[in-house]
């Protein structure tokens, strides 16, 4: 469903060129949930935004459903995939209520039966009818992320891209959103890419995980191998050790 080949993304800041992503390649099969992990600045979110068409890549290629996806996407191409951002408060329009937020993509794409689809999308993500005419500031962080997920899914895209979808939420809410995403993956038959710095999150949701460091893909492992620590690179072992935290034995 998704094929990334030798993806390179460079940014120019003054006279300095930043090599954010260097020669990254991987494939994601239909209905697979693929994870990308790495420390801050490793390039994982840049890869995701390049796939989404939110930024231009310098070289390489991205294929979506066996078709090349260039830097400029048509409306039909954009309908194939949707994006859930890290901070739901920043990604929702503060002057639109939930009804307006969910209606907008349907209106843009000329979809009929808007009221029914808005109601169904809200129900799918666990929002109640009383939330429909509330504004983002009147919702909790978890409810705002549910709205963002509903907006992403309301056009029934086959691909969902998730950039740290739980990191801005309270720990008590993170598990609810992760369980919701696992349920929606099945009911919507989604192909997904999940970017996170949290190894436990990707091991819970993903089939395979790409590990990135300094813009390069270090290795791709299965979720079972990640949980058991069966990795080939020193960097992956360091990530696993860091995720387990400090113990007295380290002192």
Image (cartoon, rainbow, N blue to C red):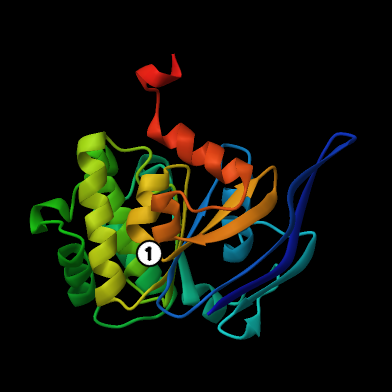
Q: Residue at x 47, y 32 (%)?
A: 242
| Relative height, residue 222 to residue 243 (above, below) | below
Q: Residue at x 52, y 39 (%)?
A: 239
- The image position of residue 64, as x and y in percent, is 58, 78
Instruction: Please rate how many residues cluster around mark 1, counting C-alpha atoms within 10 Å: few if below 14, some from 14 to 19, many from 20.
Output: many
- Residue 9 sits in quarter: bottom right
Residue 142 in sight:
yes
- The image position of residue 48, as x and y in percent, is 57, 58
Left or right, residue 106 beside residue 67: left
Report the label total.
Answer: 1
Q: Residue at x 25, y 51 (%)?
A: 177
| Relative height, residue 32 to residue 210 (above, below) | below
- The image position of residue 152, as x and y in percent, is 37, 64
Left or right, residue 3 beside residue 134: right
Between residue 150 and residue 177, name the one nearer to us.
Answer: 177
Looking at the image, the residue that sits furthest to the right is: 15
- The image position of residue 228, as x and y in percent, is 40, 51
Q: Residue at x 52, y 60 (%)?
A: 221
Which residue is disc 1 drawn over?
152
Q: Secondary structure at mark 1?
A: helix
Looking at the image, the residue that sits furthest to the front is: 249
Left or right, residue 5 beside residue 149: right
């Amino acid at each position: 469903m998704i094929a990334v080949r030798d993806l390179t993304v460079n940014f120019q800041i003054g006279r300095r060129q930043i090599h954010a992503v260097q020669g990254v390649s991987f494939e994601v099969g239909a209905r697979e949930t693929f994870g990308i992990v790495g420390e801050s600045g490793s390039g994982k979110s840049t890869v995701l935004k390049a796939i989404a068409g939110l930024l231009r890549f310098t070289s390489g290629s991205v294929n979506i459903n066996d078709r090349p996806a260039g830097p400029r996407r048509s409306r039909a191409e954009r309908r194939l995939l949707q994006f859930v951002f890290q901070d739901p408060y920043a990604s929702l329009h503060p002057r639109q209520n939930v009804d307006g937020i969910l209606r907008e993509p349907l209106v843009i794409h000329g979809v009929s039966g808007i009221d029914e689809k808005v109601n169904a999308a809200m129900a799918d993500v666990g929002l109640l009818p009383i939330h429909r005419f509330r504004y983002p500031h009147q919702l909790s962080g978890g409810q705002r992320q549910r709205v963002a997920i509903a907006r992403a899914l309301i056009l029934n895209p086959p691909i969902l891209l998730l950039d740290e979808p739980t990191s801005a939420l309270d720990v008590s809410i993170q598990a609810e959103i992760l369980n919701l995403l696992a349920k929606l993956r099945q009911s919507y038959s989604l192909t997904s890419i999940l970017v996170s710095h949290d190894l436990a999150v990707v091991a819970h949701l993903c089939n395979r995980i790409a590990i990135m460091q300094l813009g390069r893909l270090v290795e791709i492992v299965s979720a079972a191998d990640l949980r058991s620590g069966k990795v080939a690179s020193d960097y992956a072992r360091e990530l696993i050790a860091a995720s387990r935290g400090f113990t007295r034995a380290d002192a």
